[in-house]
Image (cartoon, coloured by chain):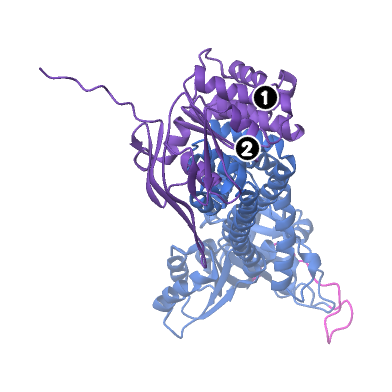
């Protein structure tokens, strides 16, 4: 009698022997060295490490903004190179950048709606504007603020618009680069709560690069990078 | 089509840059439209001038006959022609206008007045006579003579002669053959006025302009004036066609049997300046197109450099690169429409003023040393049609595409990782 082996669900994101080298005309710098990592759904990760340890490069590769010099990165078991970085960024990953990178000729609301239009995200309610306002409210921005041009918002408000925009994409993996750096304690606490909720109730994979030990303490797992290698927390 | 929406947001928010683009497009479109209108108008006017003015070729020679003149006149390069058969005769019962001055060698009031005769000119087309084409002589009653008159016995008389003999249109006058043996009655078809003053000294009656009459050459031949015109004038479209006419004349009259004079002064005065303006405007259209494309390309390139973060962000969201180029193309092209509308308002007036200025300059250079009071050049026929606007719109769109395609190469090479500031 044949026995069926239990199905093995691949990790949401898996790094296998990933190395990355930056090369200019004179110098060749190895930023990441033979990284093996697995990021699971339903988990809130933080990545710590001193400056130059490779955190941002790790984020860049994981979010599909760049491809590794060596090794493979798989999303749900599929090589990102095969899936296509553009498609991966469009359908499966969203990033909150440290510099916000909002579209400065739009209001906060238009920024969020534009992200939904580009990624094709369709809210359950069916109405993008209502959903965008809901997300902005979730990060603490009222409708009046939502209707203002983003250049007229404070740094903290812009950061919250960037987070709302990432949430609007309704992707499997959410990346964030120092998302609470410009926020006051209460707002930062609220944002961390949103990340936890995304991971625990919506089964998303949340990966946050930070220097904040407070943020790290509230994540499910913490990875520490040193000199391009995972020093603590490797899978 | 969300990139179109983004383009609209961007245009609305960046009013300064949008105004700059609009200004540049307005200048480019106005100059282009002006150039096209001017070129079209000069082409039309040149064709009209060639038809109206043309080049006069005068052929003289002993072998010239009515038949050879008609044969040459049937050449495809000839638009109109007019043989001139001159003779003097004394018509019976038709007192001539005489000079009031004393005849040299005779006592004042001597009896030799009224001798000589009437200057009879056999022609085919009075409109081609130099006096009539320059306006020195004008028809004041009735009509001029045309090729339709052929051998009809009709005559064109001077107003002073008509007054002296109480002639009016429809009356008949007697005309005699040069030898006086034959006489026939001719009907007055028209009366003309000659603006020239009589000479300050005595001249024979036949040399006074008042005693010049014109009748169809064929009718005068029948009367006995012969069939050998003194000369024939052929109107052709341009000086380039003179060579063909000369070849035909040589074939008919022999290579040395005739004189062939080309009078292209009117053509040079009026057609050449138009041709030069047309050539200049064609070059101008190209220059504006190229410079407009270069300027807009530079502006869009600089804009795209300033917007690298925005482009990187959109790429990070998974936006397709062609849509990023599309957004910039829409942003540039969207400004084209209002610019075109404004240009349509200004282009016609600009073309008229610029055309007249250019034409004055060109005509002065062609007719240097002549009396500028004789010249009143203007480029008329400037008409804007949908085709001209379409051409400008197509070129404007082409410029917009070039202006975004070149910097678009930069977008294609753009990598989304560039937006991540290295904070390590």
Question: Are the residues flagged by discs 1 and 2 in contact, CB closer than 8 Å?
Answer: no
Element under disc 2: loop
Res. A2 visible in picture: yes
Q: Which residue is mark 1?
A: A189
Rendered colour, chain B? blue
Chain ID for purple? A
Give the label on residue A178, or none. Answer: 2
The residues colored magenta run B89-110
Majority SS type along the magenta span: loop
* Front residue of this view, candidates B171 and B364: B364
Q: Chain of mark 2?
A: A
Quarter-of-image position of residue B344: top right
Residue at the image point whose x is 51% and y is 80% from the top: B61
Circle 1 crowding by C-alpha within 10 Å: few under 14, some 14–19, many from 20? some
* Front residue of this view, candidates A105 and B351: A105
Circle 2 crowding by C-alpha within 10 Å: few under 14, some 14–19, many from 20? some
A2 left or right of B424 in image:
left
């Amino acid at each position: 009698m044949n026995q069926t082996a239990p199905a093995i669900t691949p990790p949401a994101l898996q790094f296998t022997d990933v190395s990355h080298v930056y090369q200019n005309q004179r110098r060749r710098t190895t930023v990441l060295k033979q990284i093996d990592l697995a990021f699971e759904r339903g988990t809130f990760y933080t990545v710590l490490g001193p400056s130059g340890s490779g955190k941002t490069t790790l984020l860049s590769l994981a979010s599909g903004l760049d491809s590794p010099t060596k090794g493979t990165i798989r999303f749900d078991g599929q090589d990102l190179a095969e899936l296509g970085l553009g498609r991966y960024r469009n359908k499966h990953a969203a990033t909150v950048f440290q510099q916000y990178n909002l579209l400065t000729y739009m209001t906060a609301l238009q920024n969020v709606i534009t992200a939904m239009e580009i990624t094709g995200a369709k809210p359950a309610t069916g109405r993008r504007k209502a959903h965008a306002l809901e997300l902005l409210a979730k990060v603490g921005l009222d409708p009046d603020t939502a209707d203002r041009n983003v250049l007229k918002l404070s740094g903290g408000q812009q950061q919250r618009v960037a987070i709302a925009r990432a949430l609007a994409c309704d992707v499997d993996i959410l990346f964030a680069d120092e998302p609470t750096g410009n926020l006051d304690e209460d707002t930062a606490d609220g944002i961390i709560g949103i990340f936890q909720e995304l991971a625990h109730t919506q089964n998303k994979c949340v990966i946050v690069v930070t220097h904040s030990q407070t943020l790290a303490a509230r994540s499910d797992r913490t990875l520490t990078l040193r000199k391009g290698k995972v020093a603590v927390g490797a899978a | 089509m969300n990139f179109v929406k983004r383009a609209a947001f961007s245009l609305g928010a960046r009013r300064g840059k949008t105004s700059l683009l609009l200004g540049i497009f307005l200048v480019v479109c106005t100059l282009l439209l002006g150039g096209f209108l001017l070129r079209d108008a000069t082409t039309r006017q040149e064709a009209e001038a060639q038809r109206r003015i043309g080049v006069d070729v005068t052929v003289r020679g002993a072998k010239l006959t009515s038949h050879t003149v008609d044969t040459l006149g049937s050449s495809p390069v000839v638009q109109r022609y007019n043989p001139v058969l001159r003779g003097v005769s004394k018509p019976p019962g038709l007192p001539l206008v005489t000079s009031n001055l004393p005849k040299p060698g005779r006592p004042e009031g001597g009896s030799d007045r009224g001798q000589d005769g009437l200057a009879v000119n056999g022609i085919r087309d009075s409109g081609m006579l130099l006096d009539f084409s320059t306006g020195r002589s004008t028809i004041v009653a009735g009509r001029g003579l045309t090729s339709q008159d052929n051998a009809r016995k009709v005559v064109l008389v001077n107003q002073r002669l008509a007054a002296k003999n109480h002639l009016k249109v429809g009356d008949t006058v007697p005309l005699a053959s040069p030898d006086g043996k034959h006489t026939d009655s001719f009907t007055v078809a028209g009366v003309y006025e000659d603006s020239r003053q009589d000479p300050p000294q005595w001249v024979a009656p036949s040399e006074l302009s008042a005693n010049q009459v014109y009748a169809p050459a064929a009718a005068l031949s029948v009367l006995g004036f012969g069939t050998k015109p003194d000369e024939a004038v052929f109107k052709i479209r341009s000086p380039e066609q003179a060579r063909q006419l000369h070849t035909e004349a040589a074939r008919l009259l022999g290579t040395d049997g005739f004189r062939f004079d080309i009078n292209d002064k009117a053509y040079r005065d009026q057609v050449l300046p138009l041709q030069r303006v047309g050539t200049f405007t064609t070059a101008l259209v190209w220059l504006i197109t190229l410079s407009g494309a270069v300027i807009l390309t530079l502006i869009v390139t600089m804009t795209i450099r300033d917007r690298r973060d925005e482009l990187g962000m959109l790429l990070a969201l998974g936006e397709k690169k062609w849509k990023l180029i599309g957004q910039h193309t829409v942003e540039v092209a969207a400004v084209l429409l209002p610019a075109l509308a404004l240009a349509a308002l200004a282009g016609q007036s600009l073309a008229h003023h610029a055309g007249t200025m250019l034409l004055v300059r060109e005509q002065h250079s062609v007719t240097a040393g002549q009396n500028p009071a004789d010249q009143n050049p203007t480029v008329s026929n400037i008409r804007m049609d949908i085709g001209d606007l379409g051409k400008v719109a197509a070129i404007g769109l082409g410029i917009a595409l070039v202006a975004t395609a070149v910097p678009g190469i930069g977008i294609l090479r753009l990598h989304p990782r560039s937006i991540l500031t290295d904070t390590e």
